[in-house]
Amino acid sequence: MAKKKSKHDKDPDEGKKASDGKMSNKVYEAELYKLHAELVKLQYWVRMTGHRVVVVFEGRDAAGKGGVIKRITERVSPRVFRVVALPAPSEREKTQMYLQRYLAHFPAGGEVVLFDRSWYNRAGVERVMGFCTDEEYERFLADVPSFEQFVIDSGIQLIKYWFDVGMEEQQRRFEDRIEDPRKLWKLSPMDVESYRRWYDYSKARDAMLAATSSTHAPWHLVRADVKKRARLNCIAHLLGEIPYEDLPREEIQLGKRSMKGKYDDRASIADFDFVPEKY
């Protein structure tokens, strides 16, 4: 199927950029609203056609992967858009074929699976932190293009994103996580180690992109120093990659509510224990 050109390819805020690249909440929310509406159309098309999509989100810690995934999924059904964020492998999983635990989460017909980090852990954190051997790492880089060709040949659309954030912006986001009690959970010992090993991760990224950005499964890089723009740009690009159409749907009508058996159904539960209304 031919790739559909996205009407969102143009900068959604052209001519309105601030000198520091920031975007006003008003403009951001207006553009996000439009993209959410398109994602709902995409969801319906995926369900009706049985299309299968895998979207990989990779990048440095604090690059904004989780933020864009949240915005993609907040207005669609989790039964269609599934998020996969796997923990460290168990002792049993360590003895399996490396890609095995990822394959278990691949989509059935009518599903979009979003990987918040993926099999590319082997080319990133495992490589830098020494969690895999040199042989395992080299074999992974050699085998991934063939694996991804197999995925595509089986009828699954594969889309890969790398979120690129600068050194100063990453530091600012880490410091924000330390100071904000709502975000402390986002900062793990592994994140702190990645902060210290910036250039080791840069070299691992460079090697990964060079070895695994293929014609059939290219990497798409997202400039992520400005979160709002990164989210809008990524979602707009994703919509442009999938050849969905706005399929016709039956008009929904509520009809008339039946008053048969009418009674005071609020009074009937008045004596039960309600949550105190503090707000």
Image: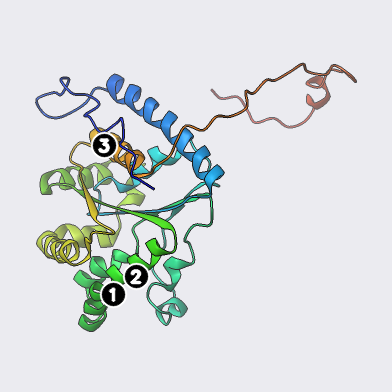
Label 3 and label 2: CA atoms lie apart by: 28 Å
Label 1 and label 2: CA atoms lie apart by: 6 Å
Asked if residue 130 lies left or right of residue 247, the reply is left
Asked if residue 229 lies left or right of residue 72, the reply is left
Marks 3 and 1: in contact by CB < 8 Å? no
Checking the image for residue 143, the label placed there is 1
Label 1 and label 3: CA atoms lie apart by: 30 Å
**Foreground residue among 208 and 168:** 208
How many residues crowd around disc 3 within 10 Å: few (fewer than 14), some, or many (20 or more)?
A: many
Asked if residue 101 lies left or right of residue 50, the reply is left
How many residues crowd around disc 2 within 10 Å: few (fewer than 14), some, or many (20 or more)?
A: few
Checking the image for residue 147, the label placed there is 2
**Quadrant in which residue 23 is drawn:** top left
Tell me the mark number nearer the camera, choosing from 3 and 2.
2
Could you say whether the residue bearing mark 2 is in a helix, strand or loop?
A: helix
> What residue type is disc 2 on?
Phe
Provide the residue designation for mark 3: 233
User: Residue 15: image x %, image y %?
Assistant: 15, 20
**Foreground residue among 29 and 167:** 29
> What residue type is disc 3 on?
Asn
User: Residue 268: image x %, image y %?
Assistant: 83, 24
